[in-house]
Every structure is written in structure tokens, then in C-alpha cells.
Image (tube, helix red, strand yellow):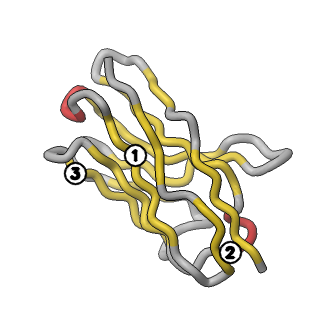
Amino acid sequence: QVQLVESGGGLVQAGGSLRLSCACSGSIFSIDVMAWYRQAPGKQRELVARITDSGITNYADSVKGRFTISRDNAKNTMSLQMNSLKPEDTAVFYCNAVMRNGTTLTGQGTQVTVSS
């Protein structure tokens, strides 16, 4: 059973950077697509970025050019490098994985707060 644990959130000033990590307790090779979602207060959860097992990436328009998603199958981790952060990026960020058997897993979330 794969479990996901996020880390790296925190408080940063606008224009700053943060790097989120998602550690998988099981083998990442059992995972098809991994993604980062976020949910701001009072808003619906939205897709931030996703990466397939072959490394194909997709980004929300709001983060293109600022965020970079990556995946290290050898270390069973996924990361999200966030640069040029804006106050509107403030949200709880969740790691998500779609397993090859169709099961979807989500981590507990990590808070990112960007001050103006």
C-alpha cells in the first residue's frame, strides 16, 4: 500500500521560492500519474501540475513558467519547485497519485502561505 507524505510548505514573501516534496512509502513504479493539487480558503481544489510515469508534464495556466514538477523514481519522490510566488498561490497543497490499478491516493496536505 503506497502512502504519500508532503513536506516543504511554509511562509514566504511574494517573489520568493519554495520546494514541496512528496515522499512515497511504497514503490513509485506502481504509480501511473502523479500530481499536485491545491485548495485555497473558500475555493475548490484545483490541479496545479501533473507528471506521467514517462515524464510528460502539464501545468495550470496560473503557474506556467513559475512552477516545475519533477519525479525521481529511484528515490520514490515527487517535487514541486515554486518560484516567483504570489499571494494568490496561498493554499494547502496536496500530493496525488493515480495507481496503475486505478486507485487514487492523496496526501494530508502542506500549507503554503505567501505574504504580500
Q: Report the mark closest to the observer, 2 or 1.
A: 1
**In which quadrant of the rendered image does the C terminus lie?**
bottom right
The secondary structure type at the circle numbered 2 is: loop
Q: Position of residue 72 (x, y in %)?
A: 22, 51
Residue at image mark 2: 86
Amino acid type, residue under disc 2 in the picture: Lys
C-alpha span from label 1 to label 3 = 10 Å
Residue at image mark 1: 22
Amino acid type, residue under disc 1 in the picture: Cys
C-alpha span from label 2 to label 1 = 22 Å
The secondary structure type at the circle numbered 3 is: strand
Residue at image mark 3: 72
Which circle's residue, 1 or 3, is located before the other in the chain?
1
Left or right: 31, with 62 as reference point: left
Establish if 13 lies above or below 105. below
Amino acid type, residue under disc 3 in the picture: Asp
Snapshot quadrant of residue 57:
bottom left
Q: Residues within 10 Å of mark 2 (few under 14, many from 20)?
A: some
Which circle's residue, 2 or 1, is located before the other in the chain?
1
- Residue at the image point whose x is 25% and y is 27% from the top: 26
Establish if 109 lies above or below 56. above
Q: Position of residue 45 (x, y in %)?
A: 68, 41
